[in-house]
Image (tube, grey):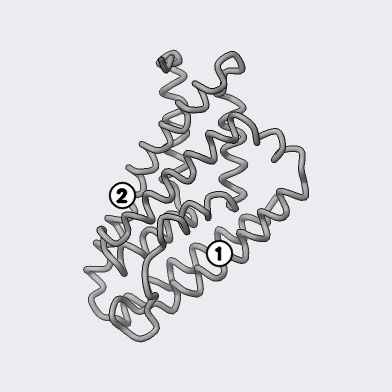
Amino acid sequence: MLMLPPLDVLATLSSLALVASITPGPNNAMLAASGANFGLRRSIPHVMGIALGYALMIFLIGLFLGEVFQRSAVLREVLRWAAAGLLVYVAWKIATARGLGTEGAAAKPFSFLQAASFQWINPKGWAMGTAITAQFVNADAALQSALLIALIFVVVILASSACWLLLGRAIGRLLKTSNNLLWFNRAMAATILLCLVLLFVE
C-alpha cells in the first residue's frame, strides 16, 4: 500500500512539480509549436512521452541515480552538450516549419519515444529531479516515496502540457496564413535557443 506523506508535504511537492512543469522551457515551447502545427490529436504521443519519460527518470533518480549525477562532472557535461545539440536541431526544424501541408514543414510531430528520450538528456530535468528527490524521498521507504513523486509528476505534467498544447493550437488557428505561422514557429525556436543559453549559465 502506498503511504501518503503529510498533507503539507504533499502540497509542497505538488506545487514544486507544477512550477517546474508549467513554466516556459524547451518542452513547453516544443509543445506549443506542435499544437500550432499539428493540432491536439497528433501531439498526444509527444505529451505522453514527456509525462511518462520524466516520471520514469525521476523515479530512477529517487532510487539510484541522483548521487551518481551529482558526483560526476563528466556525466553532467555530456548531458549538457547532448541536450545542446538536440535543442539546436529541434529549434531549426521548428523555425523552418511553415505549417501543415506546406513546403519546409516538419514531416510529423515528436513521437512518444523521441519526447521520452529527450527527458534523459535534459540537464535541467536531471538537476531538478535530483533536488526534488533529495528533499522528498524517504530513505526508510525509498521505493514508495519515489513512486509517489513520479505519479505526482505524471499528473502535473499531463495537465501543464495540455495547457501549452491548447495555447499552441489556439495561436495556430489565429495565425491562419503560413507566413504568420512561420513567425510564430521562429518565436518558439528562439525560446528554445534561449533555454539553450541558460544551460550554460552556471
Camera-nearest residue between 201 and 34: 34
According to the picture, the residue beneath numbered tag 2 turns out to be: 163
Query: Is 34 placed left or right of 76 in the picture?
Result: left
Tell which circle, 1 or 2, labels the residue nearer the N-terminal end.
1
Measured from the top left, where is residue 24 in percent x and y? 45, 52
Q: CA distance from mark 1 to mark 2?
A: 22 Å
Q: Nearer the viewer, residue 78 or 177?
A: 78
Q: How would you rate the neighbour count of disc 1 (Cα within 10 Å): few for under 14, some for 14-19, many for 20 or more?
A: many
Does 54 sit above or below residue 97? above
Looking at the rendered structure, the number of numbered marks drawn on it comes to: 2
Amino acid type indicated by mark 1: Leu
Mark number for residue 162? none
Find out whether the residues at labels 1 and 2 contact each other: C-beta distance under 8 Å: no
Q: Which residue is nearer to you in this view: 178 or 4?
A: 4
Give the residue drawn at x 44%, y 13%.
6
Q: Residue at x 57, y 37 (%)?
A: 129
Pointer 1 residue: 87
The image shows residue 160, relative to residue 33, as above or below, that is above
